[in-house]
Image (cartoon, helix red, strand yellow):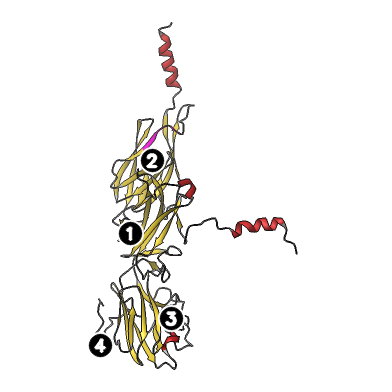
Amino acid sequence: MNRLLPLLALLAAVGCQPRFDGLEVTLYSNPPVPVRVSDQEIEMSVGLAVAIDVEPQSSTRFGYYTDDPMTLRSQDRAVLRVEPTENPRRFVLVAVSPGDTCVEIEVLNDDHGCIPATVLAAPN
Amino acid sequence: MRTPPLLLLLMLPACTDSYDHDDSPKYGELGVGAFLYRCPADGDPTCPAGANTAPSFPSALALGSQIDLQYTWQDDEDHFGDPLPQLQSATSARLRDDGSRFTALEPGFVAVLALTGNSEVVDFVHLEISAIDELRVVSGDDPIPLLKLDLLTGEEQDLQGLVVDLRDTRLGGILPYSWVSEDPAVLELVSGSNSGRARVRAVNPGTTNLTVTQGEHSLTLPVAVELGSSSASDSDSSASDSTGSTDSTAGTTADTDATGGTSSGTTADTDATSGSSGTTGGVL
């Protein structure tokens, strides 16, 4: 029985972890031209910047802590930059030049896919 | 009558200045600080004469113009000792940045970011860049466009060139201008012949044309100078505040219902070849 204790402890620890179940994305700033920003797509016109608040969602009853490290990273910063702010859950998307890229999501040092992003040449 | 204490208490906040920075800024969209609009040279109609900071941001910047921007913390106590963030254009193809100097290269909206040394965005603001549709000349700070100039000998007048877009929005930013008097013996340029703000002086009685050029836009103002009845020295300020048509000592102005279309008569952007002296340099 004693041999099983570490295994049980490990299983219990894993069970208490949050399990990533998408991002809740909220627009924080109000850009002069409408943008589309969600955990499924990002679409904005070149030249714009928009601040977003993101919150990782958990499918278990254990949620993420606000100080759990989280990163959004653009695969092509020449198209779209994703810059951090003082608030670890707030990021600024900067549409640099027209094109497509993807914004990678990393929570607790685990990759969770990416959000397709399009920067449009002209305002909508 | 005794003032109730409650009334005094209510009046107190109204009498205190909660924002002690100079001038009127544009607050950043993250609410951390504010952006100040600086005019790097004389001639931007956004900055009053003699001031290098605008009282407010223009609705849009003129394509091709230059401005300086500066960032200030909204709450200095929260950022005591912190270096001011660097300003950076969201896209240099639309707004080129060179330190605090920005050049408008392409129409559209563009964000200016305030970044710390470790690339955190502190704040940002959006500016709009708009193409120039029409060139106008106004007298001093009077917003009504001039159609012609009527001056007395010895009289000096400050003239401001300004540009508007298709929506009749006045555009900000420093732009190169050219002011040419076809007959300097009648009307001479005192200062600002390459700036947006020029001062002219009526020298001798007669008529001539004053041609203003900004890029591909040109405007010719007919000028009539009459013999002044008194000495020249007292006429300096009289011109700039008379914009109606009743007083012959100042320029004739267009009606204010002008909404972007060119006024009839003398303000059409002409080829500026009328007149005789051929000193219409810079006309494209």
Mark 4 residue element: loop
In what quadrant of the picture does the N terminus of chain B appear? Answer: bottom right
Mark 1 against mark 4, which lies toward the viewer? 1
Q: Which mark is residue B101?
A: 1
Q: Quadrant of residue B235?
A: bottom left
Q: Quadrant of residue B34?
A: bottom left
Say whether residue B65 is left or right of residue B75.
left
Q: Are marks 1 and 3 in contact (CB under 8 Å)?
A: no
Please, which chain is the residue tagged with disc 4 on? B
The answer to which of marks 1 and 4 sits earlier in the sequence is: 1
* Residue A69 within the segment the image draws in magenta: yes
Bounds of the magenta segment: A66-71
Q: CA distance from mark 2 to mark 4?
A: 68 Å
Q: Amino acid at mark 4?
A: Ser
- The residue to which callout 3 is attached is B254
Q: Quadrant of residue A123?
A: bottom left
Q: CA distance from mark 1 to mark 3?
A: 35 Å
